[in-house]
Every structure is written in C-alpha cells, then in structure tokens.
C-alpha cells in the first residue's frame, strides 16, 4: 500500500503523540512506501514558521528521518480538487485529497471530515 501522509499525522510522528495509535504505526511500518505531497510540505513549513505547531524539526529532515518520498503536485489535480464536494472548507486539505485520488494513494488522516470524501483512507 502506498500511503500519503496528512500534515497532522506527520506532526504526530515527529512528536510521538499518543494519538498516533499502535495499529496506525503498524500500518505505516508495513506500507510499501510513505509519500508526502508538496502541499503537505508547504503546510507543515508554513505552520512551523508561524509557530502554530509544536515541532522544531525542519521538513527536509523529516524526509530522511522517515524515508519519505516527496510527491510534486500534479498539474491536473486542480481539476479534481475543484470538483470535490464542499465538505471541507480548507483548500489545502482539498488539494491533498485530490492528490491522493489522482495518484491512487491511501490517505492517512485522523480528520473525519477528510475521510468523508471519496478517497481511500486509513486511520
């Protein structure tokens, strides 16, 4: 299984957050590969620079630490994102959902609103 990590999950991995459940760590450990969208890289770095997340580790270091595969945002994903129902108001999250759909990834997210979309997900 190819997993695409939500920003929240990435932050929890860095912090060893208790909400990062045992079964989720098992799923991640058994994944074929772990991927992060360029959208997530932007969101993580932006939140970090504004002091909105409790992490000090720069995003670039996470790529090596967790053996992440960076995914550029596909040009045509905007078409997928704009057609998604307006369940979630956050455009960054809709872009990540579109990326997961277009790339045939399983999206790892704790966000129930995101999981309401027609996207393969696990939590």
Image (cartoon, rainbow, N blue to C red):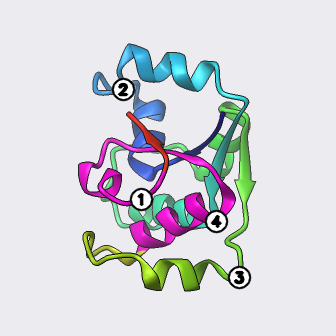
Residue contact between numbered discs 1 and 3, judged by CB atoms under 8 Å: no
User: Quarter of the image containing the N terminus?
Assistant: top right
Nearer-N-terminus badge (4/1): 4
Image marks 4 and 3: residues in contact by CB distance under 8 Å? no
Marks 2 and 3 close (CB-CB < 8 Å): no
Question: Which label's residue is closer to the chain start, 2 or 4?
Answer: 2
Does dot 3 land on a helix, a strand or a loop? loop
Give the number of the disc on residue 100: none
Residue 57, above or below 81: above
Q: Which residues are magenta?
A: 92-119
Q: Position of residue 65 (x, y in %)?
A: 67, 32
Spatial CA span between label 4 and label 3:
11 Å
> Residue 68 appears in which quarter of the rendering?
top right
Looking at the picture, how far across and down is residue 31, in whole percent? 65, 27
Q: Quadrant of the C terminus?
A: top left
* Residue at x 61%, y 19% (from the top left corner): 29
Question: Residue 20, which numbered label?
Answer: 2
State whether residue 15 is above or below residue 23: below
Q: Separation of disc 2 and disc 4 at Cα?
A: 26 Å
Residue that label 4 marks = 102
Question: Mark 2 vs mark 3: which is more N-terminal?
Answer: 2
Image vertical order of residue 54 relative to residue 31, above or below: below
């Amino acid at each position: 299984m190819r997993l695409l990590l939500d920003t929240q999950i990435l932050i929890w991995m860095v912090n060893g957050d208790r909400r990062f459940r045992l079964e989720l760590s098992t799923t991640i450990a058994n994944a074929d590969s772990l991927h992060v969208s360029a959208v997530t890289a932007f969101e993580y770095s932006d939140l970090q620079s504004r002091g909105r997340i409790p992490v000090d580790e720069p995003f670039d270091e996470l790529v090596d630490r967790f053996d992440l595969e960076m995914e550029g945002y596909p040009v045509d994903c905007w078409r997928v994102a704009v057609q998604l129902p307006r369940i979630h108001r956050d455009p960054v999250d809709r872009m990540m959902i579109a990326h997961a759909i277009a790339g045939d990834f399983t999206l790892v997210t704790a966000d129930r609103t995101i999981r309401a979309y027609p996207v393969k997900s696990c939590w």
